[in-house]
Image (tube, rainbow, N blue to C red):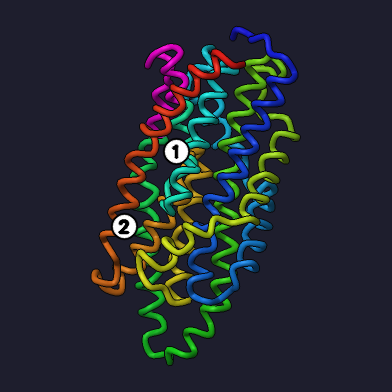
């Protein structure tokens, strides 16, 4: 692999941009982890955000770095990666995140980053720069993760409904208010474990391109891992309140038992995907789980128009962020 010549200032700028994206990832996706527990009234928003941020960081001790390897080495050809490609990818993803946050659209930060990487790489070297296996895994899970969330969320809801069919509603509500604390923590753990690794992969790719880290290294430097988990946790701590309402109330009205089932189904999906090294969208996953819980009660409980709007945002995320990243790559060629 050709080593690029990179000044320490440009390297610091790009690492800083990556950590800003990671902060925004936590800020943007905080809603995914806390929307259900807030909308059911189990926790106050500030408490829920603090808990989610804590478990985002704790994930560093519980999962491997399979997703980081997919993003860092399995998405685009490492030989074409330089500081312009990384700059374009990060700026494109950040711009798309800001747009979707402003309009309260729960799009995927993960796929914005993948789209940004694809757009910048294609702008530089054409489609031959893309690596099919890693991208195929990402595209497959665009469909698989919400479907898994939907199926697991609805199955858990059906099982719970069957087990507690004769239990007084007030008692069920009391129990699941407590259980939802555990399901929300589990989802935040899965969220941190999968999402923080995408930025780790980008910085790892940059360090390899600059010759700072060996291409044969099995893991990125520990400072990269800790910095990314910290940035994401801080972003979660500040929260993305515009999206909480969409996720927690507009798709379907949730009670504590429904919130527990959605979080449990979503968390299981994230743990499976992370173990497989698939960079999935936590937004897709929890949305699928919430829809599954709502439809398990009755189809009319789901506001399908809102769900449809979210799906359109999913469809546009990768091409939109890729387009913005291609422009950012061109700008970067003239300013860096």
Residue 66: where, in percent of width, then height? 56, 36
Q: Is residue 317 left or right of residue 49?
A: left
Magenta span includes 26: no
Q: Which residue is mark 2?
A: 307
Residue 76 pos. (x, y %)? 48, 21
Secondary structure, mark 1, is: helix
Work out whether mark 2 precedes mark 1 in sequence or the reverse, and give the earlier one.
1
- The correct choice, above or below, for 4 with respect to 307 in the image is above
Q: Residue under label 1, please give it.
A: 111
Quadrant of the image containing the N terminus = top right
State whether residue 267 appears in this view: no
Decide: few, some or many residues near mark 1? Use Cα within 10 Å; few <14, some 14-19, many ≥20.
Answer: many
What range is drawn magenta here? 118-137
Q: Closest to the observer: 332 or 171?
A: 332
Q: Which quadrant is home to the C terminus?
A: top right
| Percent coordinates x, y for residue 265 in the rendering | 44, 61
Q: What residue is at 62 percent from the left and 44 percent from the top? A: 23
Give the quarter of the image for residue 46. bottom right
Q: CA distance from mark 2 to mark 1?
A: 18 Å
Query: Dot 2: within a 10 Å radius of its alpha carbon, few (fewer than 14), some, or many (20 or more) residues?
Result: some
- Name the residue: 46% across, 26% down: 325
- Residue 238 coordinates in the image, percent (x, y): 63, 55
Q: Residue at x 44, y 46 (%)?
A: 100
Label 2 element class? helix
Picture layout, residue 186 above or below residue 135: below
């Amino acid at each position: 692999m050709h080593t690029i010549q990179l000044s320490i200032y440009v390297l610091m700028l790009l690492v800083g941009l990556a950590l800003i994206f990671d902060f925004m990832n936590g800020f943007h996706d905080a809603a995914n982890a806390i929307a259900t527990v807030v909308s059911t009234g189990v926790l106050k928003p500030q408490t829920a955000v603090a808990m989610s941020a804590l478990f985002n960081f704790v994930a560093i001790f519980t999962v491997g770095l399979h997703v980081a390897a997919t993003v860092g080495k399995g998405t685009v050809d490492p030989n074409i990666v330089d500081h312009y490609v990384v700059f374009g990818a990060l700026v494109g993803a950040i711009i798309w995140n800001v747009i979707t946050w402003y309009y309260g659209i729960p799009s995927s930060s993960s796929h914005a980053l993948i789209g940004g990487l694809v757009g910048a790489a294609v702008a530089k070297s054409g489609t031959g720069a893309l690596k099919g296996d890693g991208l195929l895994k990402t595209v497959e899970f665009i469909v698989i993760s919400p479907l898994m969330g939907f199926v697991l969320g609805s199955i858990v809801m059906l099982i719970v409904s069957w087990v507690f069919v004769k239990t007084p509603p007030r008692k069920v509500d009391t129990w699941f208010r407590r259980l939802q604390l555990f399901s929300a923590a589990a989802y935040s753990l899965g969220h941190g474990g999968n999402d923080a690794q995408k930025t780790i992969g980008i910085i790892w790719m940059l360090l390899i391109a600059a010759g700072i880290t060996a291409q044969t290294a099995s893991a990125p430097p520990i400072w990269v891992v800790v910095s990314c988990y910290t940035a994401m946790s801080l972003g979660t701590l500040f929260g993305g309140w515009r999206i909480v309402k969409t996720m927690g109330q507009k798709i379907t009205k949730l009670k504590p038992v429904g919130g527990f089932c959605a979080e449990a189904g979503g968390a299981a999906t994230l743990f499976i995907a992370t173990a497989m090294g698939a960079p999935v969208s936590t937004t897709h996953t929890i949305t699928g789980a919430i829809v599954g819980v709502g439809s398990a009660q009755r189809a009319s409980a789901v506001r399908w128009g809102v769900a449809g709007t979210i799906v359109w945002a999913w469809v546009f995320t990768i091409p939109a962020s890729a387009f913005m990243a291609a422009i950012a790559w061109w700008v970067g060629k003239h300013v860096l």
